[in-house]
Amino acid sequence: MLELLQAHHRMGGRELARRLGVDERTVRRYAARLEDLGVPVVAERGRHGGYRLMPGYKLPPLMLTDDEAAAVVLGLLAGRRLGLPGQATESALAKVQRVLPAALRDRVQALRDTLGFTLAARDAAAPDTGAVLTLAEAARERRRVRLRYRSWQGAETERDLDPYGLVFHSGRWYVMGHDHRSGEIRTFRVDRVAAAEPGTARFDVPGGVDPVQHVTRSLARVPYAHEVEVLLETTLDEARRRIPTATATLTEDAGGVVMTTRAERLDGMARMLAGIGFPFVVRRPEELRGHVRDLARSLEEQAGR
């Protein structure tokens, strides 16, 4: 009965009796027994009455079916690998596994022992759980936040941020919003947030703001040694299927699609252009042409061996 009440906001006595395979008198007795155990069950009379759990001074024990418990464990295993807060994930996983039935615990352990991931763990990028929750709540309530933020060089700054939304991308958490220190819409890594304190000031989110789109585009504009512009002879839809938005900006052009991006090494950019499979025209920098020629000569030599 407790499991059913946790899964539904309200259930009628007749429906509970049917689901439990008992009569309605037994349902009333179960409700009284739950009250004795400290679980706040509210019985409502009338046509639309029934039973529901009332948020009370005690948290009802969480009851999960085998499938639900397995889903929780799988989610925690994947979350740990993808960069969710590490310590909280580990402790939650340990608690769930301790209370699993023996047969299910053995099956879940078999999965842990044999499951592999293609994405490397990014434990170093796991943010503080408190910072994630504070920023999420502030974004929902449109409340300004005072951040203490560490740059990639380790320098700390304090800034007021109007958080528009959180984005989880490629194993890292980001928050984007209006940064009052710079006066611009900025993207910040949450794992570099040393402290986040909600304030009293409120804000409005500008129309048309898309946190996911902004974060992926801002990551594509991260400064590297070279700015690259290439005309791809293909359609915008085809280019988007092969080129992630976090790596480049794609703009439709009369001759195809203009790809604008940045690169630390031009030889790596030459290999990327060869790999996407579209005919292309290098617009800038001119040095990229030489790296494409070098790659072509190397491939021709390899083909002749």
Image (cartoon, rainbow, N blue to C red):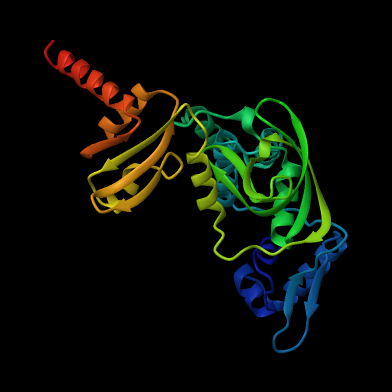
Asked if residue 89 shows in the view, the reply is no
Percent x, y for residue 35?
Answer: 85, 65
Q: Residue at x 81, y 52 (%)?
A: 198
Q: Quadrant of the N terminus?
A: bottom right
Residue ranking furthest to the top: 305
Q: Residue at x 41, y 41 (%)?
A: 248
Asked if residue 297 shows in the view, the reply is yes
Q: Residue at x 77, y 85 (%)?
A: 45
Give the image quarter of residue 244. top left
Badge count? 0
Give the image quarter of residue 162. bottom right
Residue ranking furthest to the bottom: 47
Above-or-below relation of 155 to 12:
above
Percent x, y for residue 152?
Answer: 65, 28
Percent x, y for residue 239?
Answer: 30, 46
Above-or-below relation of 42 to 194:
below
| 243, 78: nearer the viewer | 243
| 59, 289: nearer the viewer | 289
Left or right of 254 in this view: 174: right
Left or right of 198 in this view: 204: left
Q: Quadrant of the C terminus?
A: top left
Q: Residue at x 69, y 64 (%)?
A: 204
Percent x, y for residue 243?
Answer: 36, 42
Residue ranking furthest to the left: 304
